[in-house]
Image (tube, coloured by chain):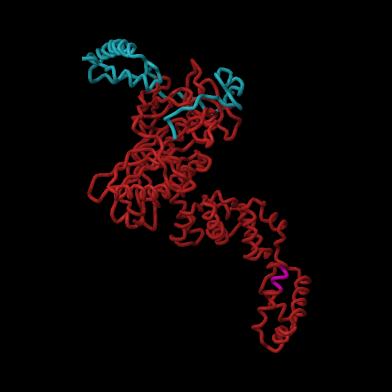
């Protein structure tokens, strides 16, 4: 039984805005399945007393003080932008996300 | 069906999600400033622009403010929790995700008590969590400025990364016809609580406090109906109007045998109704997961206890104290609260006005004007200092009630402080006895027959001459003084 279906891969591709061809769907579904099955094996050995780990370092409460540090200039901020207009990043219109 | 008829048939359930932008000096995960109104993209850095390799570090002040809000809302504070990534593709966040909290909010399970028409209602708080604000998108190229028809979007990331606290209520059933008013009272109470903490300026019109309203209807005894979420509700008045119009809209559909779809709707300030927004058919899938770049938050219980101890006076307690000081009834204090006038009156008194004088202007002339303009009282265009100055001019006898109203009208219209408006419009009470005597004598000379009647003892006829004097002085004389002077000049006093 595959850990991930072809439909799920297509759904993820759509959420990630990736144009994936039919052949790629088959290939990625197979590859992702191998990865997921490998990760699933960890679950087989993890006992009840081992909580899921999200961070590899045992640290909590790392904060900074509320003190301003220098920002980039507008020119610097926009220097890597593919397009800009009047100090703002210019991007293609986005459909179906907002009224 | 009228609104009242609807509420005899259906029961509404409401829920509110309120976003409060914190007033920290810097953003939540980087040291960029948070000043309002800065030039676009001048308060940005590699972290909030999501440049490769940049790593976030949490702002202690943002964590503290969130915990304080949670405590003030009677919440439990998590002993350990994590930030989460909310993944989505939209250019208002350059990271393609928003740093937020998912199943481990910092604060849970609290409540807020609000009083409407003398009855107290408890609104349960589901959660209070910390996240970051998004950038501002400007849609251009279309005729309407909305995204439909727009050809491109312009983005300013100054706001991206400013700490945002989301406060979510539990669903509130059983409010009946009062649901819209109670929703408004809750948001007002929340605003007052957050303001008392000093963690945000909570100005709805500037967007530092924003509200989404969930509404559903069901028949008595049946399961709760499908809810809609109304966004874009950006004033206290709008909260009430949004709930009311959504109740009316849904009732009409249900009565017609129709179905309510779970959807996001947008509140229209101009018409007071809601319009459909994004369809939930393409169900959002945010693929939340714990933020690997930020370590867990584990507030020290001693710190939380000290924050709890140092909470300020509750707004409800403060109101009781002010009511006593001002010497007004519970009902009057309720109207003052509902009108959003507590702080305004308090500040007006602090600026030198009497409690009665301060309350008179805010609850009378200015409340009426705010209603006409369809704005919150605080946005009507007059400041507490201006109202106090106006009252002082009245107390000093320089303005009578009628003139004071005209001066206030000028203040609201942006003509300056009361003294400026008075000077510019020439509205001072005529106290100059010489000028007044001349006006009285002129009136007597111009109306010899009436003057003769008064001399013969028909004092009631004096009204016509007083009127004539008031006319020539353009209402700037004190009518009582005119009458006395008139009778004196005619030798009948």
Q: Position of residue A89 (x, y in %)?
A: 55, 24
At a point 51% along the width and 40% down the height, the residue shown is B198
Q: Which residues are magenta?
A: B469-473
Q: Position of residue B235 (x, y in %)?
A: 48, 46
Q: Residue furthest bottom?
A: B456
- Is residue A73 found left or right of B104 in the rendered image? right
- Is residue B245 found left or right of B389 in the rendered image? left
B338 or B206: nearer the viewer: B206
Q: Is residue B399 above or below residue B75?
A: below
Quadrant in which residue B76 is drawn: top left
> Which chain is painted in cyan?
A
Q: Quadrant of the C terminus of chain B?
A: bottom right
Q: Is residue B424 above or below residue A77?
A: below
Q: Is residue B291 above or below residue B450?
A: above
At a point 58% along the width and 29% down the height, the residue shown is B40
Instruction: Inspect this view and state whether residue B345 appears.
Output: no
- Is residue B283 found left or right of B97 in the rendered image? left
Q: Is residue B453 magenta?
A: no
B282 or A69: nearer the viewer: B282
B261 or A42: nearer the viewer: B261
Q: Main secondary structure of the magenta part?
A: helix
Quadrant in which residue B294 is drawn: top left
Q: Position of residue B362 (x, y in %)?
A: 55, 57
At a point 49% along the width and 20% down the height, the residue shown is B50
Quadrant in which residue B370 is drawn: bottom right
A51 or B45: nearer the viewer: B45
Instruction: Inspect this view and state whether residue B396 appears.
Output: yes
Q: Quadrant of the N terminus of chain B?
A: bottom left
Q: Position of residue B222 (x, y in %)?
A: 23, 47
Q: Colour of chain B?
A: red
């Amino acid at each position: 039984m595959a850990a991930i279906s072809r439909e799920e891969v297509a759904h993820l591709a759509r959420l990630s805005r990736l144009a994936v061809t039919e052949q790629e769907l088959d290939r990625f579904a197979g590859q992702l399945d191998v990865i997921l099955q490998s990760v699933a094996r960890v679950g087989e050995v993890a006992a009840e007393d081992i909580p899921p780990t999200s961070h590899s370092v045992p640290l909590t409460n790392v904060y900074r003080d509320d003190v301003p540090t220098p920002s980039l200039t507008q020119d610097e901020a926009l220097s890597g932008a593919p397009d800009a207009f009047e100090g703002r990043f210019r991007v293609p219109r986005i459909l179906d996300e907002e009224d | 069906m009228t609104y009242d008829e609807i509420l005899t048939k259906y029961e509404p359930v409401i829920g509110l999600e309120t976003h409060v932008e914190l007033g920290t000096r810097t953003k939540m995960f980087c040291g960029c400033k948070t000043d309002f109104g800065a030039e676009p993209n001048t308060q940005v850095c590699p972290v909030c622009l999501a440049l490769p390799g940049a790593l976030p570090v949490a702002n202690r002040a943002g964590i503290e403010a969130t915990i304080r809000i949670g405590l003030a809302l009677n919440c439990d504070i998590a002993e350990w929790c994590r930030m989460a990534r909310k993944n989505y593709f939209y250019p208002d966040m350059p990271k393609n995700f928003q740093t937020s909290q998912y199943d481990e909010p910092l604060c849970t399970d609290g409540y807020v008590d609000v009083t409407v028409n003398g009855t107290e209602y408890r609104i349960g708080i589901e959660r209070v969590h910390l996240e970051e604000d998004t950038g501002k998108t400007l849609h251009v190229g279309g005729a309407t400025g909305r995204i439909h028809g727009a050809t491109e979007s312009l983005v300013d990331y100054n706001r991206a990364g400013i700490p945002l606290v989301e406060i979510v209520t539990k669903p509130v059933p059983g409010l009946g016809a009062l649901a819209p008013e109670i929703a408004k009272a809750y948001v007002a109470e929340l605003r007052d609580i957050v303001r008392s903490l000093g963690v945000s300026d909570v100005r709805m019109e500037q967007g530092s406090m924003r509200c989404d309203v969930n509404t559903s209807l069901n028949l008595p005894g049946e399961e709760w109906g499908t809810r809609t979420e109304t966004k874009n509700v950006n004033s206290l008045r709008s909260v009430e109007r949004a709930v009311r119009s959504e109740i009316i809209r849904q009732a009409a559909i249900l009565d017609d045998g129709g179905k309510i779809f779970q959807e996001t709707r947008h509140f229209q300030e101009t018409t007071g109704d809601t319009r459909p927004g994004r369809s939930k058919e393409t169900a959002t899938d945010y693929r939340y997961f714990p933020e690997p770049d930020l370590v867990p938050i584990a507030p020290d219980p001693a710190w939380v206890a000290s924050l709890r101890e140092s909470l300020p006076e509750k707004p409800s307690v403060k109101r009781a104290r002010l009511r006593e000081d001002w010497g007004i009834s519970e009902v009057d204090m309720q109207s003052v609260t509902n009108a959003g006038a507590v702080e305004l009156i308090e500040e007006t008194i602090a600026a030198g006005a009497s409690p009665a004088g301060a309350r008179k202007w805010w609850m009378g002339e200015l409340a009426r004007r705010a209603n006409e303009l369809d704005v919150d009282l605080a946005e009507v265009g007059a400041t507490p200092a201006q109202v106090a100055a106006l009252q002082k001019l009245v107390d000093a006898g320089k303005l009578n009630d009628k003139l004071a109203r005209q001066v206030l009208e000028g203040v609201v219209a942006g003509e300056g402080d009361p003294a400026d408006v008075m000077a510019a419009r020439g509205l001072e009470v005529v106290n100059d006895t010489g000028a007044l005597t001349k006006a009285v004598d002129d009136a007597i000379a111009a109306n010899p027959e009436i003057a003769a009647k008064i001399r013969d003892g028909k004092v009631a006829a004096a009204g016509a001459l007083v009127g004539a004097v008031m006319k020539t002085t353009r209402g700037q004389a004190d009518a009582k003084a005119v009458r006395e002077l008139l009778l004196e000049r005619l030798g009948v006093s």
